[in-house]
Image (cartoon, rainbow, N blue to C red):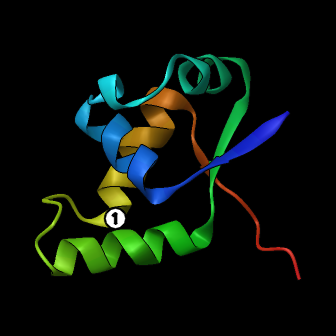
């Protein structure tokens, strides 16, 4: 099964701040294939431009993919 992570979770995983996740969220993250919506990259760009995060979206996504196997999901029309 695949689950989509929201922007907050992507940022928390990148920062190593897994303490913000519930036990159930951690279990689901470990047990499923992980995806982020393409809109998450847009939201990350906004956060970067507003200086809310320090890493640009592409390097952040590259880290998430290589560390956690998180891929960008396809938009469904």
User: Is 72 placed left or right of 46 in the picture?
Assistant: right
Total residue callouts: 1
Residue drawn at (50%, 67%) of the image = 40
Residue hosting label 1: 57
The residue closer to the viewer here, 68 or 39, is 39
Answer with the quarter of the image where residue 13 lies: top left
| Residue 59 picture location, percent across and down | 31, 55
User: Is 29 placed left or right of 19 in the picture?
Assistant: right
Answer with the quarter of the image where residue 46 lies: bottom left
Kind of element beneath mark 1 = helix
Task: Say above or below: 48 vs 15.
Answer: below
User: Is 75 placed left or right of 58 in the picture?
Assistant: right
| Residue 25 picture location, percent across and down | 57, 27
| Residue 33 picture location, percent across and down | 72, 33
Task: Say above or below: 14 vs 4.
Answer: above
Residue drawn at (43%, 47%) of the image = 10
The crowd level at tag 1 (other Cα within 10 Å; few <14, some 14-19, many 20+) is many
Answer with the quarter of the image where residue 76 lies: bottom right
The residue closer to the viewer here, 41 or 22, is 22
Residue drawn at (89%, 83%) of the image = 77
User: Is 44 placed left or right of 70 in the picture?
Assistant: left
| Residue 12 picture location, percent across and down | 33, 40
The quarter of the rendered structure image containing the N terminus is: top right
Residue drawn at (73%, 42%) of the image = 3
């Amino acid at each position: 099964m695949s689950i989509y992570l929201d922007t907050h979770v992507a940022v928390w995983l990148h920062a190593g701040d897994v303490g913000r996740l519930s036990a159930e969220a951690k279990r689901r993250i470990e047990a499923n294939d992980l995806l982020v919506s393409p809109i998450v990259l847009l939201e990350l760009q906004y956060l970067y431009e507003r200086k809310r995060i320090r890493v640009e979206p592409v390097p952040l996504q590259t880290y998430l993919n290589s560390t956690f196997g998180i891929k960008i999901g396809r938009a469904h029309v």
